[in-house]
Image: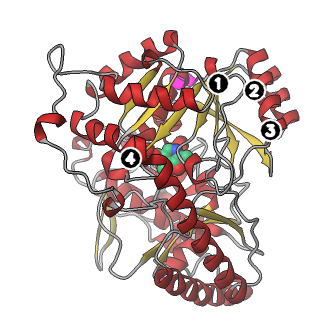
């Protein structure tokens, strides 16, 4: 197909990265029959020129549609729309989290700095559970959608000890913090409900909001947290249904909200009648101090997880919410999966009492790796800048120029996977940022920074010659 034969307006008008919007436009054109089943599409280079976008954008859009089964590429004969389009079924919003490998592993030898895996299963203290103990007798058919009472009681006691009095009825166990976020966003965000987040924010929360069909509002932040004036104006102007924040170890910036800012934000939201969700998934990784509840936490929601202290593979998270809200969230949990696995919950109940010791060990490990990563970057990439995080597994790096999405593509060809800043935002405000995890083994960090420095040298010369982003081939 000649590129000029494609319908105009191919870039969809939803929010999100350009490649996703192009995929959305192409998907629509195929479904409306404007681009027929079996048709050959223009090459990435030609379509990029025609649309005035980077070749990386077209590569990303074609890749997404191939994953959905709508396009197929045959070496030597280009990219085509599949012949039986009607069998494909509806699309789902594209995920922004590259670290979650849905369809395959990274190429051998690639160092992955894109995720936040702090520890593997070897970090789970040696447990020898008795299989009988793992089957806590169920009072009913065996389904306990809210979670096992023994685990819920331990989570409630933990919050009470941290200054947020909590009863067992106020705790719902979820399949990781991600499901807690999804349930909340489904409840508050469906039918276009407005969810306000920090900008930048956790990429998985953006995915959950998009999947729920929510309207996203991104609030500007500084080193202390969400800026107060824009929040006040937003709450006055828009009917926000939920405010999602990470007070302690924000993802991706690693900031801890100041005491004054917490108070101001909590009061403003309370005044506007907007519940605040504090996602504390990374909070145990604060280098100093510990998590404190927001002054209004009793009427809001706290999300937590064992993924970062122990192991994401356990898929144990939770939310703490007041009872009237809990009833509705529990109904959604029933619809989602009838309740999380009892076996994982039994293990979690045994691990929770040692979580304090585990947090101390993790902090020591993380600060040592942060120091190493900072030294390596300062010596090999002196033009990159960042503020030292107050906790968590990430460095939030600003490039001196250029586009993080293109650089990430190039870095992958040099053997390092990183998260481009644009994935953490609904607008382009962080296109010049990268999120680099520093939790890998020291030897891998050294290799990764060496490769990043080589990729940056190549990027600079492509940039200087004006050949970027067209010549980045993945
Ligand atoms: C801030 C934040 N929330 C939630 C999650 C999801 O965690 P879980 O593995 O518990 O689903 C992550 C994972 O990295 C995260 O960083």
Numbered badge on residue 221: none
Q: Position of residue 320 (x, y in %)?
A: 50, 25
Which one is earlier in the sequence, the residue at label 4 or at label 1? 4
Q: Residue furthest right?
A: 229
Q: Position of residue 222 (x, y in %)?
A: 81, 49
* Distance in Å between CA atoms under marks 4 and 1: 47 Å
Q: Nearer the viewer, mark 4 or mark 3?
A: 3
Foreground residue among 258 and 385: 258
Q: Callout 4: few (<14), some (14-19), or many (20+) C-alpha neighbours within 10 Å? A: some
Residue 172 sits in which quadrant?
top left
Q: Which residue is mark 3?
A: 259
- What is the secondary structure assignment of the residue under circle 3? helix
Mark 2 touching mark 3, by CB under 8 A? no
Q: Which residue is mark 2?
A: 266
Q: What colouring method underlies this structural image?
A: secondary structure
- What is the secondary structure assignment of the residue under circle 1? helix
Mark 4 touching mark 2, by CB under 8 A? no
Which one is earlier in the sequence, the residue at label 4 or at label 2? 4
Mark 2 touching mark 1, by CB under 8 A? yes
Residue shown at 38%/18% (left/top)? 330
In the image, the segment drawn in magenta is 189-193
* Distance in Å between CA atoms under marks 2 and 3: 11 Å
Residue 244 sits in which quadrant?
top right
Q: Is residue 107 above or below residue 119?
A: below
Which one is earlier in the sequence, the residue at label 2 or at label 1? 2
Q: Is residue 436 visible?
A: no
Q: Callout 2: few (<14), some (14-19), or many (20+) C-alpha neighbours within 10 Å? A: some
Q: Position of residue 397 (x, y in %)?
A: 69, 68
On screen, residue 433 versus residue 206, left or right, reads right
* Distance in Å between CA atoms under marks 2 and 1: 8 Å
Q: Which residue is mark 1?
A: 297
Q: Which residue is mark 4?
A: 30
């Amino acid at each position: 197909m000649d590129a000029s034969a494609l319908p105009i307006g191919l870039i969809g008008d939803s929010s999100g990265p350009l490649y996703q919007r192009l995929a959305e436009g192409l998907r629509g054109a195929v479904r409306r029959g404007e681009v027929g089943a079996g048709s050959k599409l223009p090459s990435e280079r030609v379509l990029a020129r025609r649309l005035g976008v980077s070749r990386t954008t077209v590569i990303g859009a074609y890749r997404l549609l191939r994953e959905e089964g709508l396009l197929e590429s045959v070496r030597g004969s280009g990219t085509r729309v599949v012949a039986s389009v009607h069998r494909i079924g509806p699309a789902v919003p594209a995920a922004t989290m590259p670290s979650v490998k849905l369809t395959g592993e990274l190429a051998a030898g690639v160092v992955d700095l894109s995720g936040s895996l702090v520890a593997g299963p070897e970090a789970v203290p040696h447990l020898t559970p008795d299989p009988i103990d793992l089957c806590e007798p169920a009072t009913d058919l065996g389904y306990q959608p809210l979670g096992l009472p023994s685990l819920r009681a331990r989570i409630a006691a933990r919050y009470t000890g941290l200054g947020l009095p909590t009863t067992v009825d106020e705790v719902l166990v979820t399949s990781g913090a991600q499901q807690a976020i999804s349930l909340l966003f489904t409840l508050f965000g469906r039918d276009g409900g407005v969810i306000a987040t920090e900008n930048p924010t956790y990429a998985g929360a953006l995915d959950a909001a998009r999947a729920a069909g929510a309207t996203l509002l991104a609030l500007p932040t500084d080193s202390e947290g969400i800026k107060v004036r824009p929040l006040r104006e937003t709450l006055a102007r828009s009917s926000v249904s939920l405010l999602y924040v990470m007070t302690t170890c924000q993802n991706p910036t690693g900031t801890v909200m100041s005491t004054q800012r917490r108070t101001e934000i909590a009061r403003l939201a309370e005044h506007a009648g907007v519940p605040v969700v504090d996602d504390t998934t990374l909070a145990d990784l604060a280098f100093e101090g510990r998590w404190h509840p927001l002054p209004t936490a009793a009427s809001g929601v706290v999300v937590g997880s064992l993924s970062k202290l122990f192991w994401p593979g356990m898929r144990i998270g939770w939310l703490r919410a007041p009872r009237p809200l809990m009833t509705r969230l529990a109904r959604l949990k029933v619809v989602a999966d009838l309740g999380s696995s009892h076996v994982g919950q039994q293990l979690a109940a045994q691990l929770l009492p040692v979580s304090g010791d585990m947090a101390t060990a993790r902090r020591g490990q993380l600060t040592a790796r942060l120091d190493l990563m900072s030294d390596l970057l300062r010596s090999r990439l002196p033009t990159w800048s960042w503020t030292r995080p107050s906790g968590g597994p990430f460095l939030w790096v600003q490039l001196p120029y250029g586009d993080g999405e293109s650089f990430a593509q190039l870095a992958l060809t040099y053997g390092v996977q990183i998260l481009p800043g644009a994935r953490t935002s609904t607008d382009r405000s962080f296109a010049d940022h990268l999120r680099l995890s520093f939790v890998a083994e020291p030897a891998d960090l050294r290799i990764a920074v060496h490769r990043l420095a080589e990729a940056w040298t190549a990027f600079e010369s492509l940039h200087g010659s004006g050949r970027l982003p067209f010549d980045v081939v993945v």
